[in-house]
Amino acid sequence: MRKLYVIGIGAGDPDQVTVQAIKAMRQVEVFFVIGKGAEKRELVEVRTAILAEHVERPYRIVEIADPPRDRTPADYQGVVEDWHERRSALLEDAFAQVDGVGGILVWGDPALYDSTLRMIERVLARGTAHFDYTVIPGVTSVQALAARHRMVLHRIGEPVHITTGRRLREEGLADSAVVMLDGDCSFTEVPGADVHIWWGAYLGMPDETLIDGPLREVEQEIVERRARLRAEKGWIMDIYLLSRG
């Protein structure tokens, strides 16, 4: 492979794909997709639908099975490092079979809580593969959440803090934070009666669900709705903003 495009495709709405992303996709001959198993097949189908809509030239899709990892590890950093290493080895093997232009469609934006760029750097660091790559930004779920709730993420002159459910449990909530990757509903552990939550799941997709309100009043509704949606679809992608005052 001589060239690779890493293309952000937005948070789920096909209309979020940018003109720059479409131009890049039209240069690609082989698209690499890391599959998440049968339960998350819909995530692959969204990608293929985007390609069918925007790319008229012939192309191939190479699907790579995502290697399993421990979701509740004692050594989180070590487990993720090992997972990235195994993922990058699979990508390296797939890249070696292509003599042309490749592409990877990344959910949201490649720079925000996605490991694709780190794995590509691992491949190049081994020295056995040589190719150039270009990153195309995409609309993040953070932006989609703010747009769907019609809100500004920060107070005037204040920073925006983006974190994970694991870090929220460890560090607590000082003022406000956008929280991603929270499979444990960590907002239920945030103390105080002055916290507001804006929550969204499947942003930009047909099953999009939004809930907002004082945290103590709506937290149980979110927990129950989240569990029901995950049971129905087999997977869930959600995000929320917490703010005090």
Image: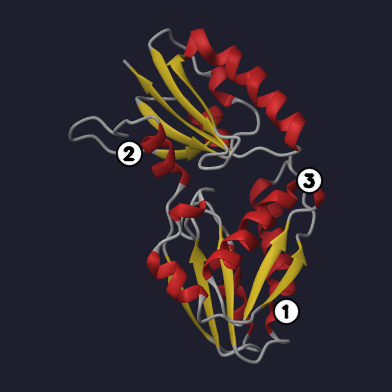
Q: In this rendering, does residue 158 appear at all? A: yes
Mark 1 → mark 3, Cα distance in angstroms: 23 Å
Mark 1 → mark 2, Cα distance in angstroms: 38 Å
The colour scheme used to paint the residues is secondary structure
Residue carrying label 3: 39
| Residue at image point 64% right, 79% down | 59
* Left or right: residue 141 compared with residue 219: left
Q: Earlier in the sequence, mark 3 or mark 2?
A: 3
Amino acid type indicated by mark 3: Glu
* Left or right: residue 142 compared with residue 14: left
Secondary structure under the numbered disc 1 in the rendered image: helix
Q: Nearer the viewer, residue 206 or 8?
A: 206
Residue carrying label 2: 160
Nearer the camera: disc 3 or disc 2 = 3
Secondary structure under the numbered disc 3 in the rendered image: helix
| Residue at image point 62% right, 60% down | 49
Q: Quadrant of the N terminus?
A: bottom right
Nearer the camera: disc 1 or disc 2 = 1
